[in-house]
Amino acid sequence: MITATANWKTEAAKLTKSAPIILFEITGYSRSFATKDPGFGTFDAWIAAISNHRQSADELGGVSTLGDLQVTVGDVAQAITGDFPFVFEGRTATIKVGFVGLAQADYALFATVVVDRVASVNKNTAWQFICKPKARNLRSVVYAAGDDGQPTGKDHPKTLQAHPLDILTDIWQNELGLPLGELDTTTINAYRDEVFTSIEFAFTLVKPPDAKTFIEKQLLAPLGGFLYNQADGTLSVRFLMPLPGGIASQHTLNPANMATLPQPGQVALVNVVTHRMDWDGDDYLVSNVQIDAASEAKYGQQGGHVIESLGMRTALGGVGLARVVAIAVFNRFGDKQLRLPQVTSMWNDAALLEVGDYLKVTHPLTPNRATGALGITDELFVVRAVSREWLRGRVKLALDDAGLVEAGAGVDPAGLGPFKIAPNTVLEYAAAPAVDQDKYMFVSDDITGQYSNADEGHPLA
């Protein structure tokens, strides 16, 4: 969720409020622009149009997309024209949003992008700044040198063996030479240490891969995750399963803050997940198939999803990882879950939401597939896409039911696992603090599967 100050949230929550003020700034450029005089600084209120900005996620495909941001600024008295030959291209630009009366420090940062090109529009009376996500820096070839220092090829392979999320960080920092501060290593390392524990991928590369494709298809998709742009321009990760500690609903939607009646759909059924692994250079030697038996029995049909990974190895925890990822897929797609493809909300109620955020929805006129009646109440959803209509003051969301993610669908505690084995420094389960009880796997009864206080044991996979 986008970060905003308490003052911003207080102003947004007011029943009587003015339209938001939008600020557009370009690093190193002497002028700054706004939709309206914010009452501070030297902003020129010359913004004439801002394109809708849409971000979406395809969790099964391991990718997210963020559209271009186009900001049209009036060329009052040819002032911008007079600033050429200033070079705009390649410079970082930001969009910040606030309200009348807020201090500049309370304006929330909504987008950090890179100016790609500048076009003269509206019969040469305005300039349009076309901006792209900072993730475009990933469009580079990596691991160009083999193990022997020669260009990577069949006779000079590059071998990698490490945790896939460590390989992601290595590509970012060492292969691309990008600042580590622009990668959300806190979240990446939390998933490495708390969810995808003790796994490694092993690659033998015979040609240098494209960084973005390699990260998405070979590192994140096999884990049920994707890379996405945060509002501050940094890149982070989201996965089908939450971090240990539970799921926090970031917002609640109801008839009072929805602008349209949500029309229900459903996700495509996926109750069979096949991981193809142990690549030998010519073919995958192992196909690990996981089936959601309850879903298959319920619907009398199978819906398959295939994940191919050049790096997954049965000898390096591949089978256990496949099981964990399959459960996460079933929790989202195994029950033909409710999908709300377009929910429109007013800006002040939903503007801070990002892809991957959880929220709850209540609406008395939305069909409930579970009860066979109209009405859903406090049902958990995850944001699959968000589109901000800056000048209309609206936000359009695409939501998928995430109730089984919260329930865990057979993985206890709710939706979490696998767990690290508790190290010797941790007390036995009944005496351990809650933070350790929620994090580790302890020895449980071999018959009941319970700990000494009758809590259900944590699964390894």
Image (cartoon, grey):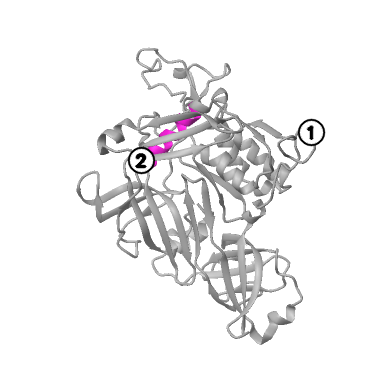
Residue reaching furthest right? 149
Tell me the SS state at disc 1.
Answer: loop
Quick check: 230 above or below 80?
above
Q: Is residue 48 left or right of residue 250?
A: right
Range covered by the magenta-colored residues: 320-333
Counting from the top left corner in percent of width and height, residue 97 is at 54, 65
**Which class describes the residues within 10 Å of circle 2: few (<14), some (14-19), or many (20+)?**
some
Amino acid at dot 1 = Asp
Question: Between marks 2 and 1, how big is the CA–CA gap?
Answer: 45 Å
Q: Quadrant of residue 16?
A: bottom left
Counting from the top left corner in percent of width and height, residue 12 is at 45, 63
Q: Residue at x 53, y 20 (%)?
A: 422
Q: Is residue 25 on the magenta stretch?
A: no
Q: Residue at x 37, y 31 (%)?
A: 291
Tell me the SS state at disc 2.
Answer: loop
Secondary structure mostly taken by the magenta-highlighted segment of the chain: helix
Q: Nearer the viewer, residue 289 or 9?
A: 289
How many discs mark residues in the rendered view? Answer: 2
The residue that label 1 is drawn on is 148
Q: Residue at x 32, y 45 (%)?
A: 337
The residue that label 2 is drawn on is 303
Q: Is residue 323 on the magenta stretch?
A: yes
Q: Nearer the viewer, residue 220 or 230?
A: 220
Judge whether residue 248 can be spotted in this image.
yes
